[in-house]
Amino acid sequence: MFFMKLLSTILLATFVANGIAAPIDPASVPEKKRTKLGLYLNGQQAHDQVTQQAGNILFVDVRSRAEVNFLGAALAIDANIPYMEMNEWFAWNDKTDNFKMEVNSEFAPLIAQRLVEKQLTKNDKIILMCRSGDRSAKAADLLADLGYTNVYSVVDGFEGDLSKEGLRNVNGWKNANLPWSYKLAKAKMIVPAQN
């Protein structure tokens, strides 16, 4: 046990000395945000990695099109590929008191397509971000079940966690003042072909 604590202290000191953010301890991640692979980043870490290694990472916003349309998106994303969408009839979910969301059947094929476009494989790093880290964790688990080995979830998401006042102002991409915009890049969005 002593050696494990010593190793952790040395690793943390190395990260700090080299200006690298320490990895997130999986045990510190709330249960609903945990993934099968146990790979996590916060918004700042995701930004830093994508900035430094853009060609070697696929960075995907997994929020619904409506969320991205009305709340904006990180400028650094490669794509918005919704993990869940509202069904076409806008069914009501009595358990959550909002409109029912269903897993997007095109999610995995679209991830695979974007990987091919970037000349990446299932073993390359994929970073997923949703609103607050819950859906990105579920999306990461889906990809892990399909054989992806290096999928990270942004635990604080685009908007962050709720404060005691019920506002999303605790953490997250936006609250870290990382680059984002309401103006969306069409090439990064899933847009149906128009006839």
Image (tube, rainbow, N blue to C red):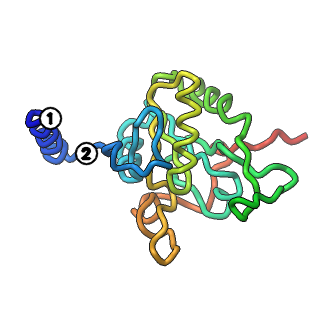
State the mark number for residue 22. Answer: 2
In the rendered structure, which amino acid carries the disc numbered 2? Ala
For marks 2 and 1, the one nearer the N-term is 1
- Residue at x 34%, y 50% (from the top left corner): 28
The span from disc 2 to disc 1 (Cα, nearest Å) is 16 Å
Return the residue nearer the eye: 73 or 132.
132
Residue 117 against residue 80 in the figure, above or below = above
Is 57 on the left or on the right of 10, as rendered?
A: right
Judge the density around disc 1: few (<14), some (14-19), many (≥20) Cα neighbours within 10 Å. few
Residue designated by label 1:
4
Q: Nearer the viewer, mark 2 or mark 1?
A: 1
State the mark number for residue 59. Answer: none
Return the residue nearer the eye: 178 or 85.
85
Judge the density around disc 2: few (<14), some (14-19), many (≥20) Cα neighbours within 10 Å. some
Residue 165 pos. (x, y %): 48, 78
Residue 37 against residue 18 in the figure, above or below = above
In the rendered structure, which amino acid carries the disc numbered 1? Met
- In the figure, residue 67 lies in which quadrant? bottom right
Residue 97 pos. (x, y %): 72, 65
Residue 11 against residue 115 in the figure, above or below = below
Residue 23 pos. (x, y %): 29, 43
- Residue at x 26%, y 47% (from the top left corner): 21
Return the residue nearer the eye: 119 or 46.
46
